[in-house]
Each structure stands twice: as structure tokens, then as C-alpha cells.
Amino acid sequence: MSDTQGAEKPLVLITGAAGNIGSRLVGQLRQEYRVVGLDMPESAAEASFPCIGFDITQDESVEKALAQVAEEWGTEVAAVIHLAAYFDFSGEESPLYEQVNEQGTRRLLCALKQDFAVGRFVYSSTMLVHEPSEPGLPIDESTPLGPRWAYPKSKAATEAVIREEAGDAMPYTLLRLAGLYTDRGGVPTLVQQIQRIYERGVKSELFAGDPTHGQTFIHIEDVIEAIRLCVEKRRDLPRQGALLVGEPEVMSYEALQNQLGCLIHGEAWDTHRVPKPVAMAGAWVEDRLEPVIPDAIDHGERPFIKPFMVPMADDHYELDVSEARDQLGWQPEHSLRDTLPKIVAALKEDPPGWYAENGLTPPDWMEVAHRRDEDPEALRADFEDSYRTTHGRFIWAHMLNIGVGAWLACSPAISGTSDAWLAMSDVISGVAVMILAAFSLSWRAGWARWATAGVGAWVLFAPLAFWAPQAAAYGNDTLVGALIIGLSVLSRPPPGVSMQAAMTGPDVPDGWEFTPSSWFQRIPIIVLAFVGLYISRYLAAYQLGHIDAVWEPFFAGSTTDPQNGTEEIITSKVSEAWPVPDAGVGALTYMLEILTGVIGGRRRWRTMPWLVMAFGIMIVPLGAISIFFIIIQPIVIGTWCTLCLVAAAAMLLQIPYSFDELVATAQFLHRRWKAGRPLLRVFLFGDTDTGGKAAEPDDFGQSPITIVKEMFSGGVNVPWNLALCLALGVWLMFTRLTLGTTGAMADADHLIGALVVTVTVTAFAEVARPLRFLNILLGTALLATPFMFAGAGALGSALSIVGGLALMALSLRRGPIRSTYGSWSRYLV
């Protein structure tokens, strides 16, 4: 009876039968052969065909599995197809290469030679065992071996084991396969390339090799057919030999990039060549930093591109498959070029499924869309269309920034800056702005916009760092630095916002009646910041020697020198302890506060949480620092500064207007954390949110009176009891003037009064109303101070006690809460 007739079909053993190739191969061969699989026990248990579990690294396990084969199916084997192998893309040597690939194959061959008659041993190797070639010089079976990294080295070593162990006893064919692909994906190098372009990663545009080089691929169905033909023609093939199996056509890296760009995004893909030393250094740094990078950022995955890959970026693998054609009658029926549309179509049809099928970690926006039962591909396409359109409308900002950078580079010559370091800083910064602003013309270069803003922040600080000797240089850098930041990141669309944050989620937080990020909420803060900026800038000019005197209408110096109080304070040891003009630092802070106050839209409480927190840090803690300096003025220096008091008041009044946005952002972060989202990633890039509602755009078409009312009343009100607390606090700050209090008692009154003012103004915010209870503690302190400190007199002591009791009583009443604030409202009852 022939091999293909009757019940006794030829027996074929397949190792690694439950894998991607093996399972398909089983389906292809079962009609003509009895197919038995060998695989790891857990994989074998799930197979839908006869499959025996075994561990190829253990003698006993291999012998036991083959004994079962012999007992149930006999010892006559038409072919053994050896697919089982260890593989990873780390590039590092692993003991598993030797244990599984080399010794495992040796163990299998020895066991087969002992008890079985094998018609042909077919081994799945790789074309990478050969030395690479050049375009137009295809590799054939006679090309010298020269594997370049751990995996193909292991394959070459295994081939040597087969030649040694099979010898003349067992016919064998070494199939050296090209990179495998299917209609839905392929080898890691291919799917990673597709992923980088699909997600528009920065590395998708960079390549360390010659983009005209490439590597051939092969469709899985063509692999199956080649193996099937090896089994079918097992008696006709040379007793020993190797065959290259792949597509004759090689798509260069550049051609592959361009076709993927067109298929995915409808555009050719720009690929920029990176010098190998730079690429290797970048890959090395990225790989070494992975352990310290939070998993919320990199999902706990090591970078795919490893340093060992960079030297091989030029490797070109173009195959001559004439031997496979002559010996097997085989030729590929597919081509990667023709299959790429199917692969991309599968990706776009079901992005989460495609990522899972190819072992890729999906981006956050894809997971969010999948959970919301929305189409991830539609979300991506809509986001890109919206982002590109908006970026195009604001392209003028980056063009203008190039001009601003040129102005900055020329300004030392124009303004006559005498400080060489400041002049050098302006020239270098100007050139950097020009380059980065040019990059920013691309809608994909959001990183360049932030880098440009970083240079702008340095330009604001440079006159302080170098103690600018000319007012013109300081003024120029102040205005130019602000312009650079404004044009780079205040222009729309805001950079750095995640796709799901930009395209999904509410305007108004869950349980709120208004959005705390509206312009009506932010404009009062920005206006007050301008007041602080002008005052601080004026005082910094005196500290830098640009003006000879500062205005002080009320307070004289505490010494016999003919100084006014302001001059004495801003030239005191406290001020001079700073390495730079402290008033200039205040001006810088106010400028950054203004700029961060303008960035983002009415949803920035969830689209840019880090910015809201930075905005709050510049207001709340720095407001507290301003109060601290106001406190120490009469206590440490012995006088006051009128302008400092006004600036501190402006800073303090910003606090209640900023508090609600901070609370909303904190609530949002807590909700996302409870939902299992990575908190750090949400904090840095924003996210969608549950609940909430849409909000109407801020209507500046209303009457001016209505607009002003909305600006100064949203989430803030002044109950009469807190107004009295504020008046009491201000009065306490100046008892040395109104009551003639002296010594420690005057200092205590001033300290307590300043704290009362701070607490009370903060409590004007409805969300911060519970803070008013801190005034009870301060009232208790007022009751105690007459008995602890001298210098008040009978009247001062009595008034301190009365004031303490009044402060405690006035702090009990809550005042009206006109809005709801989600889960925070329970703390306001």
C-alpha cells in the first residue's frame, strides 16, 4: 500500500505543533498524513489534534513522548518537522539557546535515531545565519555563514548539531526562512515598525542604517507550502542540504516606511538618517533608564530597539530562491508589498485586537476608546484631523517665533549689552529658538514647542543670573522671553494633551455646576498677576541699579539713614541673601503665572493636570511665601514696604480664585486612580473622565457688568463675618501704628494679623470655606498674647482679648455656598 492510500497514511511528527506555524501546518497536512504534535505540556493540552506534551530540555521527557508515539502510531516516520525553538529579541546570550535549540535538537535526534526510521528531518532555520549582502547581490545557499547576534548564532549552531547527529543516518533539509508575516501581522521587527508609524512615534522617523537596504519576508502560507513540499518530495530531495525560502523582491526600509505611511495616514513617511554612534548612545541610554522610568510611562516594557541592533541596521538580505524552485517546485504566491494593505486594514478594523494578536501594548487612547465601546480608529483619525487643522490655523505663531529668535540673537548688538555672558546667552538662546521654532512648524513636533518654551523661560531668568547692567537688556529679555513662551505653547492646539483627554470627556467635572477652568475663573488671577509683575519688575530695576530710587509714600527707613522703607527692605540682608535679585524672581514668577494662566481651554482641569498644579503652586505656596516676607518686614527689618504690601495683597487675592480648579483636578486624579488608570500618566498627559457635562463657551458678548460679575463671583463670595475677620486681621498687622504697641506684643499682633488675613482671604473660596476654622486657633492665640508678651498696654491688651473672642465667634458662621463641588461638597456642610 502506498504512503497516501488507506488508513495507514504516512506519519509526520511536528515539534512546536501548537505554535503559529505548527498549528497551520497540522491543518494543511492532516488530509494526506497522520500528524502528531509535540509541544510543551500546557500547549499540548489545549491542542485540537493529537499532541503529546514534552520538555525538549529533558532526556526522560523526550524519550517518554517518543515511546508514546511508537506505541500508538509506530516507528515509521515519513518526516519530522522541527519547529520548536527558543527565541527572544533582547539580543543577549541566554542559556536557553543552548538548552532548547542546540542540546534539545541533539536530544531529539539521538532519540529518533535509536528507535525510529525517519524519511526526512526538516528543520526551521533562518536566513540570518548567512552574512548580509548588498542590494543587487542576492544571497544563495553557498553564501558564507555569518550570524550577527544571539538568535541566528544559535540557529547556525543547531544546524551544525543536525549535520553532526543526522550524518548519513537520517536525511535532512535545513529551511532557512525569511522574516515571517501573515495577513494580520508578522515578525516583531515588522509589527513594531507598523506600530511606530501608526502611533506617530518620534522613532518612526529615525533610522540608523542605509534606508535603501532592506530584508526579505515570506508569507506564512508560503512557508507552509514549502514545508509541505519538503514532506511530499522527501525521497527526491538531496539527502542533506539547505534551502533558502523567501520572496525574491526586497522592499527597502524607505519603501516600506513610505508604503506604511500612505496606507495608515495617507502620506509618504519622512525617514531621517541618524549617525550610528548617536543611535547607539540613545538606545543604550533608553535601555539603561527603563528600570527607573515609572511603569505608568513605559508600561514596564524595555525598549524594542536595543543597542545591538544599531550596527546591523544596514544589513541587507536579498535571497536567491532558485534552489527551492528547482528542488521543490516552490515559489512564493504572496508578496509583502501586496499584503501590507491587508495588514493595515486589519489594524484599522480592530486596533485593540490587532495589538493583542501581535503581542503589542496598546496606547492609552486605544484602551479608553475600547472600554467606552467607541471606535479607536475613528477617535485617532478625528483627533489627527482636528489637531492638524488647528495647528495649521496657528502656524503663524511659530513663524513669528523664528523672527523673535532672530531678534534675540541680534539684541546684544542692538541694545549694547555690556555683559559678555548675557550677550552670549541671548545669541545662543536666539539661535536655539529659531531652530526649535522651525521644528515646531510640523504639527507632529510637540516636543519642540515645549523645548522652545524652556528656552524662553531661561531668557526670562538670564538677566537675573547675570545681573544685567542695562535696563534695556533686562526689558528686552523680559518681553522676548514671554513672547517666546506665549507663541510656542499658548498657541493652539495645546501640546502634550493625550488623545483621549482631547477627544473624550466632559467640560464640567462630575457634580459641579461650572467648569473651574473657564476664562471667567482665570482672568481675575491673570489681572492680579499683572499687578504683581509690574511692582516686582519695578523693584527689581532698583536692585539691579537701573533706577536710582523707588517710590514710598508712607514708611520711612528704620535707621537714621535717609532711606525709605521700601529701599531699606529690598536692599536688606534678607534680600541680599539671594544669589539673584529677589524682586526679579518675583517678577519671573508672576510672568510664568500669567503665561500658565492662559494655556489650555475650559477642560484643562483634566487635560493638563500638571499645569493646573504648577499654576496652583505658583499661587498658593508662593502666596504663603509672600505673606512670610510681609511678616518679617517689621519684625526683622523694622519697617514696611508699601509696594510689597500691594504685591502681596494681589498674590493673596489670587488664592481663592485658584482653589476650585485645584480641587477639581485633585478630584479628577482620584477618580482616575480609583478607575485603575496610571496616575502619573494621567497627571502628565490628562485623560477622559466619567460623569460631568458639556459647558457653553465663555460668552464675552454679554454686558461688561455681567462679565465682571461672573469673573469675580464664580466660586468666590465674601460673607459679612469673613469680611469682618479680614478687617480685624489688617488692623492687627498695624497695631504698632494704631495703638503704639511695641516689642514682642507688636510682633505677635503683626504675625497673627497676617495669618488671619491669609486664612480669611483663602476661605473666600467656597471650596476652601472650612479653612475659616483656623481663625479659631488664631483667636485663641490672641487671648494668650497679652499674658505672654509685654508692650501692649492696658488698652492693647483688652483689645487683643476682645479681638480674639470676636475672631473666634465670627469664624463659626460658614456663609453661603452657592454651587456644588462633587464629592467635595460634603466637606462644606
Image: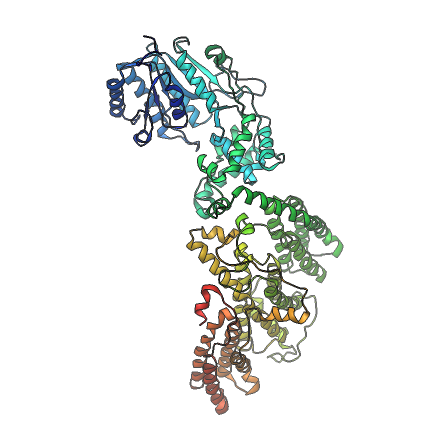
Rendered-image quadrant of the N terminus: top left
Q: How many marks?
A: 0
Res 149 quadrant in image: top left
Furthest-bottom residue in view?
794
Residue 514 lies, in percent from the top left, at 55, 64
Q: Is residue 143 above or below residue 433?
A: above
Q: Is residue 239 left or right of residue 751?
A: left
Q: Is residue 737 left or right of residue 404?
A: left
Residue 774 lies, in percent from the top left, at 45, 75
Q: Is residue 61 left or right of residue 515?
A: left
- In this picture the colour scheme is rainbow
Residue 146 lies, in percent from the top left, at 47, 21
Q: Nearer the viewer, residue 164 or 29?
A: 29
- Residue 294 visible to the viewer: no
At horizontal 48% and vertical 18% (from top left) the residue drawn is 245
At horizontal 68% and vertical 69% (from top left) the residue drawn is 703
At horizontal 53% and vertical 49% (from top left) the residue drawn is 500
Q: Is residue 265 above or below residue 721?
A: above
Q: Nearer the viewer, residue 161 or 172?
A: 172
Residue 603 lies, in percent from the top left, at 56, 57
Rendered-image quadrant of the C terminus: bottom left
Q: Is residue 364 left or right of residue 157?
A: right
Q: Is residue 473 above or below residue 126?
A: below
Q: Is residue 560 above or below residue 105?
A: below
Furthest-right residue in view?
414
Res 164 quadrant in image: top left
Q: Nearer the viewer, residue 81 or 411?
A: 81
